[in-house]
Image: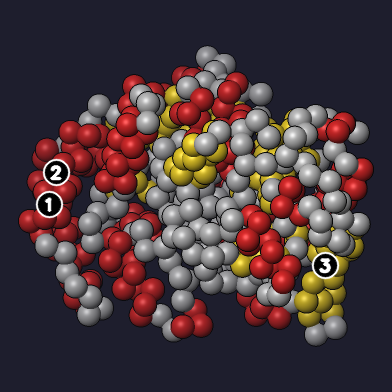
C-alpha cells in the first residue's frame, strides 16, 4: 500500500511511535501531519530509548522524515531533538524536510498557553502541557500566525515579528502573567533562520510527487482520535483533527490518496490530564497497570489514569476513520490479571448507550457495561509468531476485534521493535 495512515485510537500514549517505526522499515517517507511538541512518540531499541516529540519516528529506520504543514512547530524543540539524535549517531538533517507552510510556536505562546489554562474554572481546565500548541493554533485561525515561509522571508520577518511579539505580550499582561523579553525573544526567533532554511521546502509538492512515483509513505498522527477537536471529549481535547480527517488539510495530499488506515490502541486504556475516562480503575488494578506499563507522560512525566479497554469508544473511532486494522500494544502488561474486562456499552441513569456521546456530562456519569474474558498467565515477551500466542491471550485479542468491528493486524508483546507480531487470519 503506497500510503498508510497510522494514528492513535484512544486518548493518546498508545504506542504510535513504535508502530510507525516498525512499519517504516518498508517505507520511503514518514510524515508527521498534525500536533506539535506536546506529543511524545517513544521507540525502544535494545538498551536505547528515544522519545521523539517532532521528528517523524521513521528516521531511525532510515526513511525520509517530513514535518508537514499541519504540524505546529517549535523550532527550538526540533533543533535540540535533531542535535540529540546526531550526538547518538543518527544523521538526521539530510533526511528531514519541514513544510514552509507550518506555523511556528513563538516565545510568548507557551507562557500564554499556561496563563490561559490557569485562568479557567478548575472544572473546565484542560491541564494543557503548556507547550504553546493551542495558542499558536488559535493565532493561526485568527490570522496572526507566523509560518516557516514568513520566518525565512527577510521582508515579512521584519514587518511581522516585532508586531506579533508585542501583541503576545499585551495578552500576557492582560492575564497578569510575566511578559517575554522582546530582545531575547527576537534573538531566539532569528536563530531559527539558519537552522530551518536548509530543511524547509514545499512539502505539498514533495509529497504529491512522491505519491505519483509510487513511493511508500507512512502518515504519522500525533495525540489520538478521542482527543480530536471535533469528535473527541470536547473541551478536554487537542486543537487539531487527529485521525484521517487531519490528513488532507495537514499534508496537501488529496482525500482519496490514503490506501490503508491503521489505528493504534493499548490492550487497556490510559488518559493523562483532565477529561472523562469511563472505564478508569482507581483501585489496585489501575495502579498495577500504571506500574507495569510505566504509564507516565513522555513529555510531561504526569501519571496516567488507567482502566479497562473501552470497545464502545473504539467503535466510534473505527467508524469515523474507516479503519482497516488495529495495532494492539502492551498486551504483555495484562499477564496474570483475571478476568480481563472489555467495556461494550455505557449505562447512564438506567439507560444503555451503545454510541459514543457528545455530551460531556453523560460521559462523566457513564457506568461501563463489561464483557469479561478469562485472563492469561504465560509471559509473552519471547513470542515472535501469532501461532505461539497462549490460547487465552489469543482469545482476548479476538474478543477485542469482535467488539470493535475491526481486525487486529499488529500485536505488540513488549517495548522493543522486535517484539511486534504481524497478525494473520486465525
The image shows residue 100 at horizontal and vertical percentages of 31, 35
Q: Residues within 10 Å of mark 1 (few under 14, many from 20)?
A: some
Q: Quadrant of residue 172?
A: bottom left
In the rendered view of the protein, which quadrant contains the N terminus? top right
Which numbered disc covers residue 186? 1
Q: Are marks 3 and 1 in contact (CB under 8 Å)?
A: no
| Cα gap from disc 1 to disc 2, whole angstroms | 6 Å
Q: Which residue is mark 2?
A: 190
In the rendered view of the protein, which quadrant contains the C terminus? top right
Residue at the spot 76% in from the left edge and 30% down from the top edge: 384
Q: Are marks 1 and 2 in contact (CB under 8 Å)?
A: yes
Q: Residues within 10 Å of mark 2 (few under 14, many from 20)?
A: some
Vertical order, 348 against 93 (above or below): below
Q: Quadrant of residue 336?
A: bottom right
Foreground of the two, 133 or 303:
303
Vertical order, 217 against 10 (above or below): above
Asked which colour scheme the image uses, the reply is secondary structure
Amino acid at each position: 500500500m503506497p500510503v498508510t495512515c497510522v494514528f492513535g485510537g484512544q486518548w493518546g500514549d498508545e504506542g504510535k511511535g513504535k508502530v510507525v517505526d516498525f512499519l517504516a522499515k518498508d517505507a520511503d517517507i514518514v510524515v508527521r501531519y498534525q500536533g506539535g511538541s506536546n506529543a511524545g512518540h517513544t521507540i525502544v531499541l535494545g538498551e536505547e530509548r528515544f522519545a521523539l516529540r517532532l521528528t517523524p519516528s521513521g528516521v531511525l529506520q532510515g526513511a525520509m522524515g517530513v514535518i508537514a504543514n499541519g504540524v505546529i512547530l517549535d523550532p527550538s524543540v526540533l533543533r535540540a531533538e535533531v542535535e540529540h539524535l546526531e550526538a547518538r549517531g543518527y544523521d538526521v538533517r539530510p533526511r528531514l524536510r519541514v513544510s514552509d507552510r507550518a506555523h511556528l510556536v513563538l516565545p510568548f505562546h507557551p507562557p500564554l498557553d499556561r496563563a490561559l489554562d490557569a485562568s479557567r474554572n478548575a472544572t473546565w481546565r484542560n491541564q494543557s502541557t503548556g507547550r504553546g500548541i493551542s495558542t499558536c493554533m488559535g493565532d493561526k485561525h485568527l490570522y496572526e500566525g507566523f509560518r516557516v515561509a514568513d520566518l525565512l522571508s527577510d521582508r515579512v520577518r521584519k514587518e511581522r515579528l516585532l508586531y506579533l511579539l508585542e501583541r503576545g505580550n499585551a495578552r500576557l499582561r492582560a492575564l497578569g502573567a510575566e511578559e517575554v523579553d522582546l530582545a531575547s525573544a527576537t534573538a531566539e526567533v532569528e536563530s531559527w533562520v539558519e537552522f530551518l532554511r536548509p530543511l524547509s521546502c514545499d512539502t505539498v509538492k514533495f509529497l504529491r510527487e512522491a505519491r505519483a512515483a509510487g513511493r511508500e509513505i507512512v502518515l504519522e498522527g500525533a495525540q489520538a482520535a478521542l482527543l480530536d477537536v471535533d469528535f473527541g471529549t470536547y473541551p478536554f481535547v487537542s486543537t487539531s483533527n487527529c485521525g484521517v480527517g487531519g490528513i488532507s488539510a495537514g499534508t496537501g495530499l488529496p482525500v482519496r490518496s490514503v490506501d490503508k488506515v491503521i489505528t493504534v490502541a493499548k490492550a487497556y486504556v490510559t488518559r493523562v490530564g483532565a477529561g472523562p475516562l469511563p472505564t478508569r480503575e482507581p483501585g489496585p488494578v489501575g495502579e498495577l497497570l500504571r506500574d507495569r506499563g510505566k504509564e507516565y507522560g513522555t513529555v510531561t512525566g504526569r501519571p496516567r489514569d488507567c482502566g479497562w479497554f473501552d470497545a464502545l469508544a473504539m467503535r466510534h473511532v473505527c467508524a469515523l476513520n474507516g479503519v482497516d486494522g488495529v495495532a494492539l500494544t502492551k498486551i504483555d502488561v495484562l499477564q496474570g490479571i483475571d478476568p480481563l474486562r472489555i467495556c461494550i456499552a455505557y449505562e447512564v441513569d438506567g439507560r444503555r448507550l451503545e454510541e459514543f456521546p457528545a455530551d460531556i456530562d453523560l460521559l462523566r456519569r457513564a457506568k461501563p457495561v463489561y464483557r469479561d474474558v478469562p485472563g492469561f498467565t504465560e509471559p509473552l515477551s519471547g513470542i515472535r509468531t501469532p501461532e505461539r500466542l497462549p490460547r487465552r491471550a489469543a482469545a482476548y485479542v479476538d474478543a477485542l476485534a469482535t467488539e470493535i468491528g475491526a481486525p487486529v493486524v499488529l500485536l505488540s508483546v513488549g517495548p522493543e521493535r522486535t517484539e511486534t507480531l504481524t497478525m494473520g487470519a486465525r
